Amino acid sequence: MKLKTRICKRSSATTSEAPQERSKQFTSYPLRCVDWSSNEEIYFVSDDHQIYKWSDVSRDSVEVAKLPDDFIPTDMHWLLLGGRSSGGGKGSDTLLICSNDGRFIILNKSARVERSISAHTAAISSGRWSPDGAGLLTAAEDGVIKIWSRSGMLRSTVIQSDEAIRCARWAPSSTAIAFSQGGHISIKPLAANSKLIRWRAHDGLVLSLSWSGQSNIIASGGEDCRFKIWDAQGASLYTSAAEEYAITSVAFNPEKEQLLVGTFNMIKLCHSTGWSYSSARFTAPSVGSFFTLSWSTDGTQVACGTSTGQLIVGYAVEQQLISRNLKATSTGRKCIALQDISNGTKDVLEFPQRVINFALGYGHLVVATTHQLHIYNEKYINTPIIIDGRNDVRVIEVAKKYFMVLDATSIWVYTYTGRLHLNPRYPGSQAQLPLLNWRSISLGLDVLAIRDNSETSLLHLFDLMPGASRQYEPQSLRAKQQLAEIAACRAGSADDQFIAFIDTNRELYISETRNINGNSTTDRVVNGADEIYKIGTQLTAIKWASETNILVGVHDSCYSIWYCPGEGSADPTIIALTTITLDTAEFGKYVAIDSFEDAVITFRCAGALLPVNVNIYCEVLHRTLQEGQWQQALRICRLAQHTSLWATLAAVATRKHQLQLSEEAYSAALQIDKVSYLQHLKTLSPSSAEQMAENSLMLGRLLEAETILLHNRKYEQAVALALRMHSWKRALEIALKHQAEQPDLELVQRVLQQRQRYLKALQREEWDALFLSQLKDDNASE
C-alpha cells in the first residue's frame, strides 16, 4: 500500500500535466489550518486571513470568507452533524477557528460568524470539537485547557499550569484529553477525582498528537525526529527510527488501521502499530514541513498543509486483499485489479465513482463507491450486481451467506444476489452509528452481533435465519466487563453458533448465540451467569476459521488455537485438551491476524505475511461432524490418535447425545470420570428427559438441564437437580411454583427436609429469611 499525492491548484488553469504533478503555491504563509467539510471539499486558511474552499470535483479553489486583519489562525476543525461526510442539513455543520491572540470563532456552513470568544491570554495551539459533538476544547500557550459548549459557553477549566501546551486531542469516547507540554505527554480523564497520567515521551518538544478511534492508542511526533505510539495508560508500544528532520504532524485514519506521519519534505503512511507501508518525498519542488494532516471522514483521502503554503491531497492505492485463489488490488481511485491465482487470469474493474471500500471472501468481491455497491461473483466477473443509494460506506464484512455494510445512515445485511435481508435497529442505534467500527460489529453464519456503544458491556444479537423473530427484536447478551472486540463464528450448523469476545481486561469469553431449548439469551444471563464461559486470558485479537468452528487468538508473545471452543467451553478439561499455544518469538512483536481461511492462519507482522497451518485432521474432523458423519469422524480420530481430536469428538458427540461415541472418545482421551458418568447415563431411558438433562449436566450446562426437566413437567427431578447443586433458593422456588400442579409429591416439604438435614450436618441454625418464613408457614398449617 502507498499514498498517491497531488499538489492542488488555486485556479483551474488549463494544463496537460498529470494531477499529481501540478503545483501552485496558495500563499506565502505557512498553511497550518486545513480540514475537510465533506469527502469532496477542503477548507483551509493561513495568515493572509482568507478562508478558501477547494473542491475535489472541480479541482479548483474559491474564497469563502475573510477573517479580521488582527485574527491570525492557528487551528481549524469542522464539526459535521448532518452526516459523517455529506454536510447534512442547512446550518448543521460548524467550523471552529482559533487564533494566536487567544480568541476562537465559530462559523456556520455559510461562513457567517456565530460566536467570537476571547478564551485565553496567549495563543491557542489546539481547538477541537469532541467526537460526540457535545462541546469543544481549547488549549493554549498560557498552560490552560478549557472545555466549552457547542454554543461557546464555558463549561470547565480542565488544566491550569505554567507550562505552555503545544497540542491537545480528545479521547475517542470524549471522556479524556491528551495534551503535550515540552517533552511530556499527559492524559487527563474528565471524571471527577480522576488522576492525571503524565510521562516523558520525547527528548525534545512534542510537536503533534493523534488519538486513534479504532484502537484507542496515541501517536506522537517530536523534535527528536521520531514518532512513537502509546497505549491509553502511557505504556510505549512503538518507537520509530530517527528521521532526518523533526516529526511535525501525525494523524490516525478515522476508519482504517493507518497512521500518517509528516516531516520536512516527506510524509509516511504507516500501519497503526508503527511499521511503514510507504513514503512520499517532495524535493522538486520543495514543500517544506508538513504542519497539518487531516483525513477525510471516509478515511480514503488526506489533506496536508505545509510550511511553504502548499495544499497537498493524497489517497491510498495498492491496498490488497487475498482470499483463497483471489487477489484484489486497488490500482487507482476508480480502479481495482482482480486476479485469479489458480488460473492466472486478471480482470481490471473500473468504476464511475471513487472507490472508498472493498471486501473479498467466499468467492465474492464487494466494492463500495461513493454512492453504489458493486457485487462481483468470481464466476461472473463481467456481470456485477449494483445497489444504488449506499453512501460513504465505512465497513464491509463478508460471510458465507450474507455480507454486511455499515454506511452513514444505517447497518445493512444483503444476500449476494443484492437482496436486502436485514436492516437491524436497536434502542439508540441511530445515535451510535458514528461510533461503530469493525471491532464493535461482527457478521457470522446466521447471526449479526453489535456492541452497544452507550453500554459497552452489552451485545445485541440479530438472528439472520429467514423468518426468525430476532431479525426485528434482537436478544441481548451482557458481559461483566466492557467489550473490546467481538467475533461471531462463521461456520457450523444452525444449532451450533457461538460468539466470542475480548473484554477490556483482555480476557476471552464465549457464549452460544442460540439456545436449542428456546430460552432467550437474556434469560440465560439473568438466571445463570455460567452461560458465558471464560476460555483464555491476555488476548489482543481473535478470529474464527472460515469453514469450521476453530478459533485463533493472539497474545503478547504467543498465539493460541482452540480446536473446540464452542461445545467444550463449559468444561475446563475439554478446553485444556483442545487448546494449543505456540510461541511467536520468530515472528516479532505486535503480531496481528490477517485471515483464517480453511486450515491456514495468516499472521501479519511488520508488513510481512506469515502463514501457519492448523492441525489438518482437526479441520477435516470439524467438517465431518458438521455433516453428521459420525463413523467417518471416529475413523479420523483412530487414524490420527491425537488427544485434541478425541476431546473434540467427545464434546460434540455428548452435545448431540451420541453416548456410545462419547464413551469411546472420552476413554481414548483418558477422562475416566466422564466414562463412568456416561455409563450411568446409559442406564436411563434412551432419549428421555432425564437422560437429556443428565447429558446437559455433564456438559456443564446446569440451566439447560433444568429447562429440559421443567419443559417436560419433571418437577420432582428438577427440584432434585437443584438440591444436588446445593442451589437451595432455586429448589424452593421451583417447589413453590409447581407444588399445586402435583400436590402428592410434597415438593416443598422435601426441600425443607433436605435443608434441615444439611444445616444439621453443619451444626448451624437456619438463617435465611425465605426458609424461615416457609418453615413458619409450614408449622402453622400443621
Image (cartoon, rainbow, N blue to C red):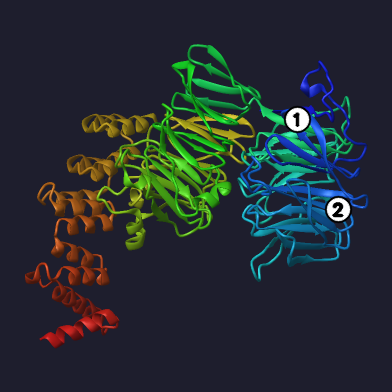
Q: In this view of the protein, can residue 241 be seen by the observer?
A: no
Q: Which mark is residue 99?
A: 2
Q: Quadrant of the C terminus?
A: bottom left
Residue 155 quadrant: bottom right
Q: In this view of the protein, can residue 230 be seen by the observer?
A: yes
Q: Quadrant of the N terminus?
A: top right
* Label 1 Cα neighbours within 10 Å, binned few <14 / some 14-19 / many ≥20: some
Q: Position of residue 705 (x, y in %)?
A: 23, 56
Q: Is residue 507 above or below residue 744?
A: above
* Label 2 Cα neighbours within 10 Å, binned few <14 / some 14-19 / many ≥20: many
Q: Are marks 1 and 2 in contact (CB under 8 Å)?
A: no
Q: Secondary structure at mark 2?
A: strand
Q: Position of residue 394 (x, y in %)?
A: 57, 38
Residue underneath mark 1: 279
Q: CA distance from mark 1 to mark 2?
A: 32 Å
Q: Secondary structure at mark 1?
A: strand
Q: Amino acid at mark 2?
A: Ser
Q: Position of residue 19 (x, y in %)?
A: 77, 22
Q: Residue at x 17, y 41 (%)?
A: 660
The answer to whether residue 233 is left or right of residue 662 is right
The answer to whether residue 548 is left or right of residue 183 is left
Q: Is residue 128 above or below residue 48?
A: below
Looking at the image, is mark 1 or mark 2 earlier in the sequence? 2
Q: Is residue 344 above or below residue 739?
A: above
Q: Between residue 167 and residue 551, name the one nearer to us.
A: 167
Q: Which mark is residue 3?
A: none
Q: Between residue 736 and residue 324, name the one nearer to us.
A: 736
Q: Amino acid at mark 1?
A: Ser
Residue 622 quadrant: top left
Residue at the far bottom in the pictured view: 780
From the image, state whether disc 1 or disc 2 is nearer to you: 2
